[in-house]
Structures are given as structure tokens and as C-alpha cells.
Image: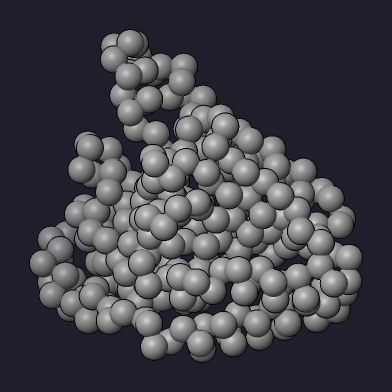
Amino acid sequence: MSIQCEVLTGADGARIGIATLDAPKALNALTLPMIEVLDERLRAWASDPGIVCVLLRGNGSKAFCAGGDVRALVEACREHPGSVPPLAAAFFASEYRLDHRLHTYPKPLLCWGHGHVLGGGMGLLQGAAVRIVTPSSRLAMPEISIGLYPDVGASWFLARLPGKLGLFLGLTGAPLNARDALDLNLADRFLGEHQQEALIEELLQLNWQEQTTLQLNSLLKAEQHRACAELPQGQWLARRAVIDEVLDVA
């Protein structure tokens, strides 16, 4: 089902859940079974007092998640012309429930958003408590290119970007790099591509019994400091004035 889940035990016995999207040939695009398995596992970890933290990541170097499995949805629509296919109804209902679970998750949930983070992948990333981007990150809501509109909560997070930038990104599907994501509050931390294993090891060494928020924040700040030289130059915030003027139509 292309989701791998594991639990690692830390120095003080605390356990960390790691969920990996494992369909690298498809850029970890979400299928209905993947969504259902991930949602079930996150629900179980949320109610397990031994799980103190969750990491969501994607396998392969190219993408965290390139969105939903559009091919399967297109085929289903062709089989049910003029109506909503059962697969589409189930897919989107399950996907939105999963996104809501992430936004309301009761435990620290980190999401490693490397490579392509598109559409449904943005829905996963934006729901996490700690949204991590890397030098390879390319974030976008490209639904406009196939005649759809930004979903998975994008009407909420794009609308909160400064000026007309959210409208611009929704209308164009233009990609953001890591600096853009940090500038526009679509990411929280920047880490290098090869820091993930070190981050996991440090999470396992934390004392999860006291001052958890402070310790976690200090850890992430230290890791980000090590990667600061790799941070790319931003593209969009500096162009806000021009974008605001062009889109000032109503």
C-alpha cells in the first residue's frame, strides 16, 4: 500500500513514530489506500501514550509528495461520465479527513518536505506542526494546470499570504523554493538534505518528560543553523509590489 510505518525507541524509553510515503517512482503520489493507511496509523499513534512524536516523510530523493494519484481519478471519471465516480468521492473525503487530522494532531508532528511538494503534498505539509523544507524543496499548488482549483486547505493558507501572493500562486501554480516558503510562513525550518538521520537520532535522545517544546525548538534551531549556507535566494516576496499591482483588478 506504499506506506511504511515504524516506531523507534529513544534513550528514555519514549517512542517516535515514523511514517514514510513509499512510492518513489510515482513521486509518492497519494492513492486512496495510502491515505487510509496513513490516517489509521496517525490515529493509532495519537491515542498511544508511549508515542511522543511523529515524523512524516517521503522515500526517494525527488519528492516528499507530488499530490494525488491523478491518473486513477481521471480513469474513474471516464468510466462514470456526468457523475461523481465513487473512487473520487471516497478519495477526496478521505484526503480531507487526513488533512484535518494533521492540522489538529495532539502530538508534535514533523513533516520533511524535500523535493516536490505539490497539491496533496502541500495539504500534508501545511497540516504539520513543524514544516521542514530543504535545498531541493519545490512547493506549489499546480491544480490550475489541469483545470482544477487549489484544495487540501489551500483556500485557507494561500489567503493568508501577504498582498496578492496567494492569488498569484493559486492562478499560476508557480513553485516556491525553501526561502520563499519560510518568507511566506509556509515552512518553519530549513535543514540540509542529509540531516534527516541526524535529526531522528537527536529526537531519540531528547528528554520527552519535561520542557518538550523548548527542547524540540532548540534542537531544530541548532540543525537549521548548520544548514543556513545552503538556503537559496527567495523569488516571490521581493516581487510582491509588482504582483499586487498586476492583480489589483477588484
Q: Position of residue 163 (x, y in %)?
A: 28, 71
The quadrant of the picture occupied by the C terminus is bottom left
142 left or right, relative to 209: left
Q: Is residue 192 above or below residue 127?
A: below
The residue nearer to you, when weighing 202 against 85, is 202
Q: How many labels, in total?
A: 0
At x 51%, y 89%, the residue is 225
Q: Position of residue 213 (x, y in %)?
A: 72, 77
Q: Nearer the viewer, residue 88 or 61?
A: 61
Residue 76 position, x and y percent, is: 36, 18
Residue in the picture at 34% in, 11% down: 80
Judge from the rendering whether residue 224 lies leftward or rightward of residue 233; answer left or right.
Answer: right
Q: Is residue 117 visible?
A: no
**Is 86 above or below relative to 23?**
above
Colour basis: one colour
In this orientation, which residue lies closer to the viewer: 79 or 8?
8
Query: In the displayed structure, does residue 128 sit left or right of residue 107?
Result: left
Residue 66 visible in the snapshot = yes
In the picture, residue 72 is in which quadrant?
A: top left
- Residue found at x 16% / y 70%: 243
Q: Residue at x 63, y 50 (%)?
A: 19
Q: Position of residue 189 (x, y in %)?
A: 51, 76
Where does the N terminus fall, quadrant-wise?
top right
